[in-house]
Image: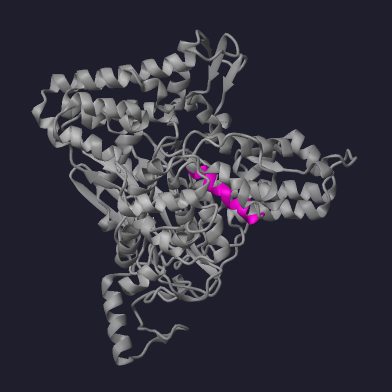
Amino acid sequence: MSTVLQVSLRGKAIFVPATIRKTAGKLLSGPAAMLVANMAKLGYGVSDELLAALSVAPPAYLAKVLAAVQKVKGVHKNWTPLVKDWGNATGETLLDHIITYFANIFQTKGTRLQCGHIIPANTFPLERYNGCPFCGTPFTKGELHLKEYKGTLQVLELWTEKDAEAYLCNLLLSKTALDATQMDSLNALLAELSLPAVEIAMKETRMAVIDALLTHNKGEEAQSLFDTPADILRYLWFKNTGMLQLTEPSVIVKSLLKNKVVSGEKEAKAKLHLHYSRKESIVIARWLNELPLKAHAMCEIMHTKRAMWVRFIRALRLAEYGNRKGFEKLQEVLDKFYNKDYTVWQGQVNTGRTRYDSAATLALLKQRPGLFARSLFSNMLWFGHEEVTEAFTEVIDKVPARLVLTLDMYAENYFDKRTKRIVKPLGGISKVVNKHQLLDIYAEDDLQEMRKAVRGLCKKAVQQRFAATPAAGKQMYIAPELFYMPVAIGDRSTTVQDVFPALMGTRFPVEGASVRLFMQWGTGLPAQHLDMDLSCLVTYRGKVERCSYSSLSITGCKHSGDIIHIPEKTGTAEYIEINLEALRKAKADYVVFTCNAFSNGTVTPNLVVGWMNSRYPMKISKNTGVAYNPAHVQHQVRVTRSLSKGLVFGMLDVAAGEMVWMEIPFDGQVVQNLDTTVVEGMLQKLKDKITIGELLTLKAEAQGMVLTETEQADEVYTKAWATNAAAVTALLID
């Protein structure tokens, strides 16, 4: 049950099996007391209920709990930076690097280091470094000395089998696509728990369930989870690439080449090579043959990914299986598909649009409400908003709630001539796109009417759905923090959050005078050149400053030094200290946090980035430079896979004194490659999202409930409840 224990920590709890909880015992054992004391050093406390469960747990399980907590907090990782006591500048200059370069070319006198480089006298102060200041190779590993934490502890609750099963159900029932953390938790729970008899809401969630069934040789049970050929293709592509979204092969190849993960196009395509055994092929052939759709409908769905299907049909030998008895439907599908003996609904829609036939186009769109919703804005500009809005009103009750809320959130931005939109193509990076060209033919009053029409229609639809659902009582309590937490729709995170997962756009207050960024990478890898860079970008009105390997100290920011080569197995770390007061005096607007892969390839897997809060004093070791304290960590994320060379992982709003959690992949080896308009656009996009508090307020109004300021209410919605994003999606009524 170690995986369940890991998932429970993400939910601010610790899992204790029933076999342990049934054990008789009253007094707190010595090992349990030691566990609680060690957890306190990491910033964790325990509830009374959890303490009672731990007090009767055997030492072996207590050791497993401590190991899990220490792993999450990175206790055994190497947190030693290049510079000792890096809060005080070393005084190194570009001239030092130039002199050292020529000293190594001509082999002049100086101190020869372990890496082989010669450091001339009167250049770098070697007593201040843990490694080579010239090539960025660390030589020593400083210890992480954990002391008693005097701050407020994060209290962990008890997790039981019932809690684990309830969380698994929430993930399966989630009405929005799961982010990387939720998907990782889902896979962990499916490996330990039985699959509950619930209807899985999202197609991407089904992929994890199908994979779990096949792992346990239950391929026949997976048949009921496939509705269309697109579902089967999604699963096949997921198994081949690890991607839950159907990213085009050309996009992946381009990314691999651009980031120099491979040496050429041939090697890139080889990574996407398809190979299936006959045992695997016949299972997939049977899945296709037994789909409930008619052959014509299956071909139409396959048409959108025709090139991919051609490759899979060959790799799976489907033509051979189609000739076998019992596979007549598969044969019919393949004949129609190769002969293109089918019509395509999207083609008919496009024909209607190009002929400006609004009646025919809208009649087709009403047949598929979800696709109507996704093209609503462009059709309003194409045909005029009155006719399109009226047609959409007829089918909005059939549109998934997540799409209804998405329309409400983005209408303001879409119909604004002055605003550039942020989009993220599948497998790509976030980009700024220009406004729709048809906006220019409309007057501002007309565009305002379109905004009002969409937002009014969506609000009414949401309220009607809430009104049709019985309330649990007459009073509702909404925690104030929920009005700052956006509903998790779109912009899903692709990094894993092991310490208290947060929704994209969540704001954290800076409870002190400074913020300390950290990055750790390379744990478990052999010594090699693996140059990851931690940087920050400070924006002012009219100028930008950057704190990175090339400028270790700027106004309000100090860098711990650039590490280029990682040591054997232990990994290494970089830090940046941000002085909030200094930035306020300098009138800075915001600070963007980034990590980049300077080496060939993308941001390395298992790289961890985050920040620490300074509510209580934070120290930098004078002897080693270690500046990591797990008890001070406010937020951190772990990269599991990446197709980009850069990642924005947060932002500091200087005036507000708030940290904003966001995730924006971008291209480029250095922070200078980051387009600040992308960050500004993402901030606006997050602001436009409806918050959980606002959604709950709509619910209260629709159901005639009274909002109270105390938790003594019939329906209580707290910050702890909202951290379970999958449970929050229960508010999205379809």
Q: Is residue 419 above or below residue 527?
A: above
Assign the magenta stretch its main secondary structure.
helix
Whole-percent x, y for residue 701 in the image: 46, 11
Whole-percent x, y for residue 213 in the image: 62, 50
Q: Is residue 433 above or below residue 314?
A: above
What is the residue that sits farthest to the left in this orientation?
A: 441
Say if the magenta span includes residue 205. Answer: yes
Quadrant of residue 310 in the image?
bottom left
In depth, the one of 598 and 182 nearer the eye is: 182
In the image, 262: left or right of 615? left
Its colouring scheme is: one colour
What is the residue that sits farthest to the front in this orientation?
A: 325
In the image, 69: left or right of 238? right
Residue 100 appears anywhere in the view: yes
> In the image, what residue occupies the spot 24% across and 36% down?
348
Whole-percent x, y for residue 41 in the image: 65, 49
Number of marks drawn: 0
Q: Which residues are magenta?
A: 204-216
Say if the magenta span includes residue 324. Answer: no
Residue 185 appears anywhere in the view: no
In depth, the one of 583 and 645 nearer the eye is: 645
In the image, 391: left or right of 704? left
Whole-percent x, y for residue 581 in the image: 36, 42
In depth, the one of 252 and 632 nearer the eye is: 252
> In the image, what residue occupies the spot 53% across and 46% down?
290
Quadrant of residue 398 in the image?
top left
> In the image, what residue occupies the spot 64% across and 47% down?
190
Quadrant of residue 371 in the image?
top left
